[in-house]
Image (cartoon, rainbow, N blue to C red):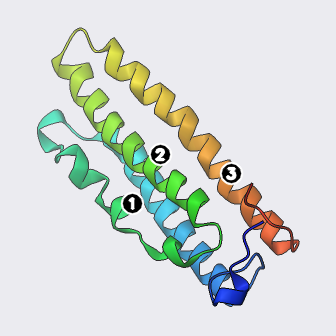
Amino acid sequence: MRLLASCGGPSASWNIEEEKIFETFQQVKSKAELILNSIDLKKPLEYEQAKVIAQPVWDWKDFEKSYIAPIYKEWRKTTGTLLEWKTQFSRARIQDPNYETTKAKYEFGLEDYKLQTQNVQDAIEKLKAGKDPLP
């Protein structure tokens, strides 16, 4: 258990600050899913650089003030990478007949995204129940 409450740092409890951070997480998650679902609708020449497409995820920093910051950070890394891989996969699928490696990276990233999203949800439920969500 992290003992930061005595230092003035975040503590393992559901409070207004954690709720605000979770709300921003939900907004970023919705935006990421919208981007993820729209990538295939674009023509290859309309793609921005992969890093630019994932920018809304990389820009999200509110999680740093959360007690479960390590869990949010892992979700952020997974989600940003997934968006970048899907962009590369979608380009390669049209432009490169040997796109299977990129496809495999994307599929792996999608599974990891689902796992990290569930980890955030589980951590929030533990916080709401007054339990320490960190290992």
Q: Are marks 1 and 3 in contact (CB under 8 Å)?
A: no
Residue type (three-letter) at the residue carrying disc 3: Asn
What is the C-alpha distance between the residues marked 1 and 3? 17 Å
Tell me: residue 53, above or below residue 88. Answer: below
The answer to which image quadrant residue 56 occupies is bottom left
> Could you tell me which quadrant the N terminus lies in?
bottom right
Residue type (three-letter) at the residue carrying disc 2: Thr
Q: Position of residue 89 (x, y in %)?
A: 30, 28
Q: Position of residue 107 (x, y in %)?
A: 48, 26
Tell me: residue 94, above or below residue 114. Answer: above
Label 2 sits on residue: 78
Residue at figure coordinates x 57%, y 60% from the top left: 70
Q: Is residue 58 left or right of residue 48?
A: right
What is the C-alpha distance between the residues marked 2 and 1? 10 Å
Q: Position of residue 52 (x, y in %)?
A: 22, 54
Tell me: residue 84, above or below residue 105. Answer: below
Q: Is residue 134 left or right of residue 30?
A: right
Which element carries disc 1, helix, strand or loop? helix
Q: Position of residue 43 (x, y in %)?
A: 19, 36
Label 3 sits on residue: 119
- Say which of 44 and 55 sits in front: 55
The answer to which image quadrant residue 81 occupies is top left
Label 1 sits on residue: 57
What is the C-alpha distance between the residues marked 2 and 3? 12 Å
